[in-house]
């Protein structure tokens, strides 16, 4: 067998090592740059080890820690609420589509697939959310638009249920007197934990990294800013101060490049902490439909 060939195993191991390094080295460079002085970054560029160690970027962030913590809290609320509602809506849409006896199943499947190819465009979407639903300057503006329902995730969950939840099990629950909602909660959901974990992780990452909704729909309520929007505003303020000549302020001491790296590190921490808990479900769920047992 080719898998027992030493040359093949060495080559595969070397390729995997290169792929791992390609994933790890950007994080190392990011962390090192956040602890490098602004002058060193401007003069020498980026390096994997700080040539001139400095905590100026983190000192600047520590000075505004109350605002950073509030933005962190808002991001946790937005991500948690948005992911929870999104999973519920995805399951309620995907489960009926997985049932072969659903009337109009093909039409509904086409409808969900059509939205992956075409949309109304940015301006009509913005007008509907702002003038019809009136979600501007509310927390729902950070939860509903673009993120609450994903057609690709619906198709993934539907395919998983069709391939991995035996129809006989669902029929048995029906014979025992369970309704469709009870079957979904008691039978389908427990058997679909891998794909639910996968979709939850991908949805949470999308919510956590999203900053466009805040730019589009938040006009005056800056207190609703999540961590991404707040950090973007910090970078904008620093860049503005560096472009001005302010008496009594040495603008050269204000970090610009290094603060971007430090803010990126801060924004990454929750995702890095959460991923190990979803890793098993993510690895299993992402291969949906590849093997049928």
Image (cartoon, rainbow, N blue to C red):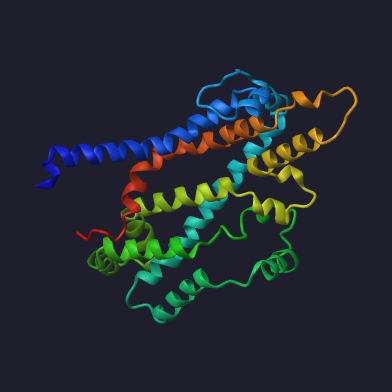
Image height of 132 relative to 145, above or below:
below
Image height of 11 relative to 120, above or below:
above
Image point (71%, 52%), residue name: 215
**The C terminus - image quarter:** bottom left
Image height of 252 relative to 200, above or below:
above
Farthest residue, direction right: 247
Measured as percent of width and height from the top left, residue 175 is found at: 26, 69
Image point (39%, 62%), residue name: 156
In the displayed structure, does residue 170 sit left or right of residue 85? left
Image height of 61 relative to 222, above or below:
above
> Residue 188 lies in what quarter of the image?
bottom left
Q: Nearer the viewer, residue 79 or 202?
A: 202
Measured as percent of width and height from the top left, residue 227 is found at: 64, 40
> Exactly how many numbered labels are in the figure?
0
> Residue 280 lies in what quarter of the image?
top left
Measured as percent of width and height from the top left, residue 77 is found at: 60, 44
Q: Nearer the viewer, residue 225 or 89?
A: 225
Measured as percent of width and height from the top left, residue 82 is found at: 56, 52
Farthest residue, direction left: 1
Q: Nearer the viewer, residue 99 or 151?
A: 151
Q: Nearer the viewer, residue 228 or 53?
A: 53
Image point (76%, 44%), residue name: 222
In the displayed structure, does residue 285 sit left or right of residue 125? left
């Amino acid at each position: 067998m080719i898998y027992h060939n030493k040359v093949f195993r060495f080559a595969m191991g070397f390729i995997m090592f290169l792929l791992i390094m390609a994933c790890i080295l950007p994080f190392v460079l990011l962390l090192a740059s956040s602890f490098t002085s602004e002058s060193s970054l401007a003069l020498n560029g980026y390096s994997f080890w700080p040539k001139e160690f400095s905590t100026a970027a983190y000192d600047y962030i520590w000075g505004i820690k109350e605002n950073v913590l509030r933005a962190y809290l808002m991001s946790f609320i937005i991500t948690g609420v948005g992911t929870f509602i999104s999973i519920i809506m995805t399951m309620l849409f995907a489960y009926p589509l997985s049932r072969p006896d659903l009337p109009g199943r093909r039409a509904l499947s086409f409808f969900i697939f059509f939205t992956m190819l075409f949309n109304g465009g940015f301006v009509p979407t913005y007008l509907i959310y702002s003038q019809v639903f009136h979600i501007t300057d509310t927390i729902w503006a950070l939860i509903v638009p673009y993120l609450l329902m994903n057609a690709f995730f619906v198709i993934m969950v539907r395919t998983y249920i069709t391939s991995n939840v035996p129809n006989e099990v669902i029929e048995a629950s029906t014979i025992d007197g369970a309704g469709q909602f009870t079957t979904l909660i008691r039978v389908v959901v427990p058997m679909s934990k891998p794909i639910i974990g996968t979709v939850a992780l991908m949805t949470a990452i999308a919510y956590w990294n999203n900053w466009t909704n805040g730019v589009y729909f938040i006009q005056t309520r800056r207190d609703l800013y999540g961590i991404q929007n707040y950090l973007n505003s910090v970078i904008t303020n620093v860049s503005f101060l560096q472009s001005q000549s302010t008496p009594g302020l040495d603008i050269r001491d204000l970090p610009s490049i290094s603060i971007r790296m430090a803010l990126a590190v801060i924004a990454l921490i929750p995702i890095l902490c959460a991923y190990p808990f979803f890793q098993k479900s993510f690895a299993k769920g992402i291969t949906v439909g590849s093997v049928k047992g």
